[in-house]
Amino acid sequence: MFRISSYNRLYLTYKYPQYIHYNERNEFEPIRTSSIHYNATDYVTIQRLFHHKKPNVRFYYEHIHNFFDIENITRFKRIMLLYFRVQRFKMAFSKFIHIVKLKVSKQFNTQNLSYLPFSNRTISIYENNRVYVFDDLELYKMMETCFNYELYDIPDILTLKNPYTNIPFSFHNLLHIHFELLRFGKVSKFFILYFKHNFNKNALLEQYQTHLYINCLERTFSQFTPRKKELLLMHMLRIFPRYKTFLNIDTDYLHQLFDSVVKYFYIYRNLKRNDIDNDSTHIDLYESKFKKRLEHVYKKNPMLGRKVFVQTIDGNFKSHINQNIMGL
């Protein structure tokens, strides 16, 4: 029926029939404004909600948030009360329908993506008349992968898709995934930002491009072999003449001293090379992170890696590389 064709209409028809123009036969009827229970504010708000076809959040911004009237606070409170009653019903009824669909629909998979039994922390998703079940961890990893993608050093956000159908998850299921992961303690800063930007990839990229790129660099660095990390360490010392003598000491000592800051150098180098950080804030931050360590070691050990000559008993001179490390 026309008058109960949406959550708003269903609730308003049941709760406020005196303000609805349509009867059970969908015939238009005038409203009795002479009734002692008639309220003009309620009537206008109910008519707007009854005929509102967009999400109720849009109604909130168009008729409540942007039209706060401090001089008529009573009227404003009535509008707010009506809106929240409708919204509360809509959320509760939607949840009820979702639970029913999960109960009666056929489950697509009986194992996780690794063909192993499910853990006791699962997330059920209803899509296309089927129920898909995921372990919280595998869904979290899928979601994290979406924010770890770059193409030619340009970060991008992949669309989170159902791996069983290769179809993107619908908007309401993205909301469901977000809150279910939070319930299980799986917190992703980028997915939270994605949620706050209404799952708008372009808006998130525009505001957090540098952060997303750094996230990609951190993931790439974590996949490097020990040999590649060692080459980065050597390169870090080679491009700064002040610390070049450190290259003369044993490699094991170098790893102990500087392994903790090689990642910062790698991020700094790529940010500077690709000119992604417009105001150089992040470039300066990561440069200070690894240079602080280099300078600390140098000030405590200015002779580290230098060739030292020592006179022997017979009067000859013998040289060795100073590898004495002090004050660390």
Image: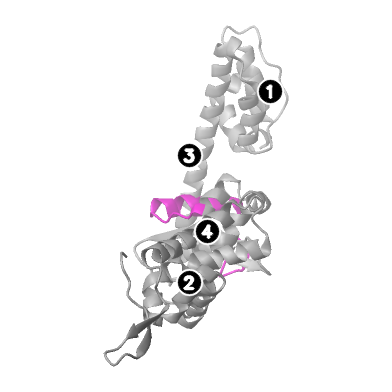
Earlier in the chain: of badge 3 and badge 4, it is: 3
* Location of residue 160 in the rendering, given as x and y in whole percent from the top left corner: 58, 61
Q: Nearer the viewer, residue 253 or 277?
A: 253
The amino acid beneath tag 4 is: Tyr
Residue identifier under label 1: 21
Q: Quadrant of residue 137?
A: bottom left
The amino acid beneath tag 2 is: Ser
The residue sitting at the right extreme is 28
Which dot, 2 or 4, sits closer to the camera? Answer: 4
Kindly tell me whether residue 220 is visible in this rendering.
no
Kindly tell me whether residue 313 is visible in this rendering.
yes
- Magenta stretch in the rendered image: 162-189
Q: Nearer the viewer, residue 113 or 8?
A: 113
The correct choice, above or below, for 211 with respect to 74 in the image is below
Which dot, 3 or 4, sits closer to the camera? Answer: 4
Residue identifier under label 3: 92
Residue identifier under label 4: 286
The amino acid beneath tag 3 is: Ala
176 relative to 2 in the view: left or right: left
Q: Which mark is residue 222?
A: 2
